[in-house]
Image (cartoon, rainbow, N blue to C red):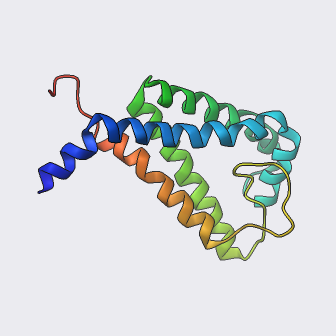
Amino acid sequence: MKEKIVDILAGLPVQLLSRLLLGGIFIYASIDKIAHPHAFAKIIHNYQLLPDVLIYAAAVMLPWVELVSGLFIVAGIFKRTTAIILSSLLLVFAVAISINLIRGIEFDCGCFSTVASDSGSASVFLLIRDILMLIPGMIVIFFQRSKNTP
């Protein structure tokens, strides 16, 4: 039974779907941030986690890492490495959301848009969403067939 599950997760359709899902999410998430780095810098500032000197650098670099990594995993380039990068980003995002949930700080997550919403979107939902988005990355990282496997 365990071998069948591993075979399914390592199979081409599941691997491809996982890569397309994870990559597509990050490509989509990067577009507005790349177009509006100043607005994204304000969102990062509202997390109250980074020193001011790092905020703008993060606002400029992070969306490009998301875009390039998303494109790479969709194209099947450095699949495992790219999945590790994207999964690591999701873990960092989950930690940042968790810290602000614990501190009771309301903020716009800036996940997919730099446009401020009417109410802060810091919630357990964001944390659960990020954790669920780790699943495709884990499938690519841990269940990818090696080139020698038939």
Q: Is residue 135 above or below residue 144?
A: below
- What residue is rendered at 51% in x and 26% in y? 72
Q: Quadrant of residue 54?
A: top right
Counting from the top left corner in percent of width and height, residue 17 is at 41, 40
Q: How many marks?
A: 0
- What residue is rendered at 16% in x and 28% in y? 149
- What residue is rendered at 77% in x and 34% in y? 34
Counting from the top left corner in percent of width and height, residue 120 is at 79, 68
* Quadrant containing the N terminus in the rendered view: bottom left
Counting from the top left corner in percent of width and height, residue 91 is at 52, 53
Extreme front residue here?
13
Describe residue 75's horizontal placement relative to residue 92 as left or right. left
Q: Nearer the viewer, residue 2 or 93?
A: 2
Describe residue 140's horizontal placement relative to residue 90 as left or right. left
* Quadrant containing the C terminus in the rendered view: top left
Counting from the top left corner in percent of width and height, residue 128 is at 54, 66
Q: Is residue 98 above or below residue 62?
A: below
Q: Is residue 56 above or below residue 99?
A: above
